[in-house]
Image (tube, rainbow, N blue to C red):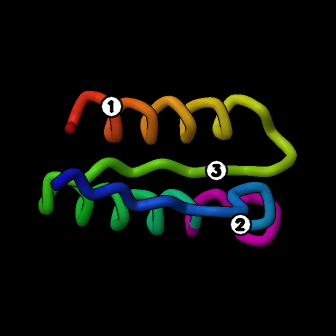
């Protein structure tokens, strides 16, 4: 069963913290995702690219994993 870790509201996260802290949090989440064989995706309502990536990974996991 594929596991997907979704970081929702990425735009609020990006605006709230400084880049060093964002980098640390993202590295920790990426490490946990890779350790467990999961995908890590950040989604944002305001930005289109992360949202399109989120949809592509969900579609891939649903239709190719079945």
- The residues colored magenta run 14-21
Determine crowd level at label 3: few under 14, some 14-19, many 20+ residues with C-alpha closer than 10 A: many
Q: Nearer the viewer, residue 4 or 35?
A: 4
Earlier in the chain: of badge 1 and badge 2, it is 2
**Left or right: residue 58 compared with residue 29:** right
- By secondary structure, the bulk of the magenta-drawn segment is best described as helix
- Location of the N terminus (image quadrant): bottom left
Indicate whether 48 appears above or below 30: above
Indicate whether 9 appears above or below 37: below
Q: Nearer the viewer, mark 2 or mark 3?
A: 3
**Left or right: residue 9 compared with residue 15:** left
Q: Nearer the viewer, residue 41 or 21?
A: 41
Question: Residue 52, image x and y in percent?
Answer: 64, 30
Query: The residue tagged with tag 3: helix, strand or loop?
Result: loop
Q: CA distance from mark 1 to mark 2?
A: 30 Å
Query: The residue tagged with tag 1: helix, strand or loop?
Result: helix
Give the residue pinned by disc 2: 13
| Image point (69%, 57%), residue name | 10
Magenta stretch contains residue 18: yes
Give the residue pinned by disc 3: 43
Query: The residue tagged with tag 2: helix, strand or loop?
Result: helix
Q: CA distance from mark 3 to mark 1?
A: 20 Å
Quadrant of the rendered structure where residue 54 is?
A: top right
Q: Nearer the viewer, mark 1 or mark 2?
A: 1
**Left or right: residue 23 compared with residue 29:** right
Question: Residue 50, image x and y in percent?
Answer: 64, 38
Give the residue pinned by disc 1: 63
| Image point (36%, 64%), residue name | 29
- Location of the C terminus (image quadrant): top left
Quadrant of the rendered structure where residue 48 is?
A: top right
Earlier in the chain: of badge 3 and badge 1, it is 3
């Amino acid at each position: 069963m594929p596991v997907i870790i979704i970081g929702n509201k990425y735009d609020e996260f990006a605006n709230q913290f400084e880049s060093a802290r964002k980098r640390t949090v993202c590295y920790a989440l990426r490490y946990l995702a890779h350790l467990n064989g999961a995908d890590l995706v950040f989604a944002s309502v305001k930005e289109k690219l992360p949202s399109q990536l989120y949809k592509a990974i969900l579609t891939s996991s649903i239709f190719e994993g079945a």
